[in-house]
Image (spheres, helix red, strand yellow):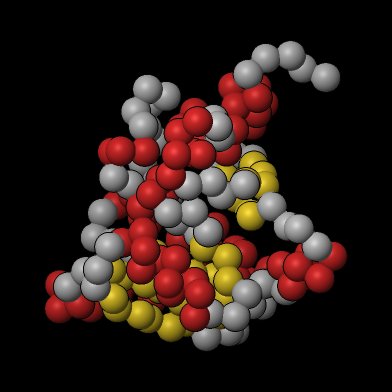
Amino acid sequence: IIDGDPAEVISAHAGDGSTLVAMATHGRAGLMRKIASSVAEGVLRRSHSPLLLVKAIDSPANIRLAARISNVLVPVDMAEVSEGSFPLALQLAEKLSADVTLLHVGEASDAEKHMDDVAKRFEGLKTGVHRQFRTGDVGSEIVDAAGTLVTPVIVMCSKRATVESGPEIGRASCRERV
């Protein structure tokens, strides 16, 4: 047993970024999120490691459903930071024999060539690679897209924020929780 702030202890134990940290989250939003500190958000802000967040599962039936991931949803934008999620998304898709859905939220005309280039990185998959283009609020569209897929997992990168910066900075990963 290690004493200390849970987010700091987990982040320190995860080390240099070569360890995948998997955690359950309550997925609180609004005022409850402001009042109740989130260990998961603290780890996201401090750690250099990839972080796998899953909603807390409330029944045995949901545990069985969650174990059958059949689609890896990968939000893609034109920023380099989103490319950090591609190797992990590819590994997950291969290990789970899951399809990959590449999602761009914004003007499709600007992103079509970029999406073609991204799709080439997933060409070796034995399963399908699909593209979706949507417009609207990025966080909401990611959540909506996940809702249209059969048992998805979302793999995305987030700029590592300082501990002091809050969710108001506008990152999709901070505004929406799945």
Residue 11 in the figure: left or right of residue 110: right
Of all residues, the one furthest to the front in this rendering is 31
Residue 15 seen: no
For the image, the number of numbered tags is 0
Seen at 31% across and 61% down, the residue is 138
Residue sitting at x 58%, y 71%: 152
Give coordinates of residue 176: x percent, y percent. 43, 54
Task: Tell me the residue at 35%/52% (across/down).
Answer: 172
Residue 61: where, in percent of width, then height? 81, 71
Residue 127 visible, this angle: yes
Who is closer to the viewer here, 50 or 90?
50
Tell me: 139 left or right of 64.
left
Residue 19, x across and y down, in percent: 64, 40
93 vs 120, nearest the viewer: 93
Q: Residue placed at 77% from the left, 17% from the top?
A: 2
Q: Residue furthest top?
A: 3
x and y percentages locating residue 163 in the rendered image? 42, 24
Seen in the picture, residue 176 relative to 112 is either above or below; the reply is above
| Quadrant of the image occupied by residue 79 | bottom left
In the rendered image, the quadrant that contains the N terminus is: top right
Which quarter of the picture shows residue 69?
bottom right
